[in-house]
Image (cartoon, helix red, strand yellow):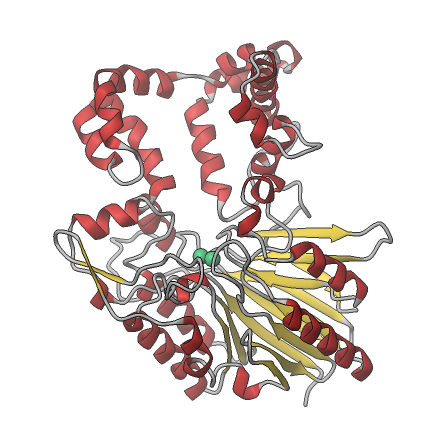
Amino acid sequence: MSRKASFYLLTDVHYVSPRNWVEGRPITLRERGDQIALKATPQILDSFLDKILADDTADTVVFTGDNVNNGDLNSHEEFRARCEKLTAAGKKVYVINATHDYCGAGDDENGFGACRYTETGTEPIPFMRKAELFDYYFDYGPKQAISVHRESRSYVVQLCEGARLIMIDDNGNGRSHCGLFEDGVQWLKTELEAARAAGDAVLLATHHPVIPPMDVYAHVADFEMYGGYRELREIMCEYGVHAVFTGHTHMHSIRKYEDDRGRYFYDIATIALANSAAMMRRVDVDADEGVCSVSCVGIETLKGVDTGGKTPHEYLYPINFPGIFEQLLPLGAKDPDAFMELAEGPLPVDKLKKFKFAIRPACRKALKLKLSTAAKFGGVWKTLSPEQRAEAKEKKVADVAFAILRHIYPGNGPFPPQTTENIVLTGVVKKLEKIAEKRKIEAVQKLIPPGSSLVEMAQDVLYNNRTGDDDNLQFPLK
Ligand SMILES: [Fe+2]
Ligand SMILES: [Fe+2]
């Protein structure tokens, strides 16, 4: 066995079988209200798999859950057929599952319902139960494992001589605790002891975040975190595990955790494959050099789709809500009826109907708003240099907002400190924070994590204040 290993990691494929929908309003509205391109998931996955199959420098493929969108058997059949195609081509495939991969049977909190989108609505279709997942995906991980925790479907594989990968399956109750129970935690510790005794480095992979991409995420939705993430952080520091690969947030993010003794690890979160800006991670492990390198790979073409000369991102971005918002403003300024039609799905159109008269003027005003006006509102106009003032007079707030929105999922926000956009928006947020404080607006105050502020929260989306790069990382294996 070599002392080097390379693998591709794909997460949140959210595969939807073409058998599960016919063209019509139900699937279209469902997709518009989501941030993932549901209908194109087979083509997106196949485009990535073609890249993997053409690359003989990486022999392993890892899927970290939400492999299908709604736990239905059609999608599982087709997803597993792709795994089979990979193994037939000589790749090792390691799969774990998550909450979208099964439907609750009334015994947990998982509320996903497998359905087919008809022309007028939805109809139920056969689905996967949690207890069936282990056998169904046995060939893709448990079969090759050097240890399996049957109860949670977690397992350990030898990546290469000197390095192991522990795949922690999404055990728990399907919603408010998605992590290992006590016996699983004991199994994990035993496996970490065994790896240590063998002199092997360990990487972890699981579905839910161990460090959130932004603190506000754990603050407002702690249940979306890996169940027992505080304990797992301690375990990782204790055993010198330097990385956990995660998904679920659909956001590309690399964040470091360091305890008070200087022990650390990274949560390397990968964007959903079903996102228009999809990427997969490439991980290269070199046990001789003691180094792990992480990078990412996207796609240039969308297999089997006539995109009219557009890149996959250009073609897919307008389908879902971040891209729809970008279309809504200019549309509303011209045609409120067309605005209402496109807004159905991502926005509560029924409630908006009352304000239809205000759509055109509001959109026109919002489109015209310059960064210079925002700078004056935020009280930072005088702090800007003459060049920055000229820039602020040129740039529109809407374009800046759209640029930020485009980076929410792929990470690496576009406006670092000292850019005009960052200075102006930070000023605006500071002003809004003061107003919220003065007027005691609880909804805003509740949103702010302890020890943080709205200004700090804004920096999380304005630029990469995490490790500086959500795409690449190199770290020592031990
Ligand atoms: Fe997901
Ligand atoms: Fe998820």
Residue beneath the point at 78% across and 77% down: 193
State the count of labels.
Answer: 0
Image quadrant holding the C terminus, namely: bottom right
- Where residue 120 appears, as percent x and y from the top left, is 12, 51
Q: Nearer the viewer, residue 214 or 301?
A: 214
Q: Is residue 472 visible?
A: no
Dividing the picture into quadrants, the one containing residue 379 is top right
Q: Nearer the viewer, residue 401 or 269?
A: 269
For the view shown, which residue lies furthest in the left direction?
Answer: 119
Residue beneath the point at 61% across and 33% down: 457
Q: Nearer the viewer, residue 225 or 12?
A: 225
Instruction: Specify whether 95 is left or right of 27.
Output: right
For the view shown, which residue lies furthest in the front direction?
Answer: 107
For the view shown, which residue lies furthest in the right direction?
Answer: 261
Instruction: Specify whether 265 is left or right of 146.
Output: right
Q: Nearer the viewer, residue 290 or 135?
A: 135
- Where residue 201 appears, as percent x and y from the top left, is 75, 74
Instruction: Specify whether 78 is left or right of 283.
Output: left
- Where residue 255 appears, as percent x and y from the top left, is 66, 51
Q: Is residue 244 visible?
A: yes
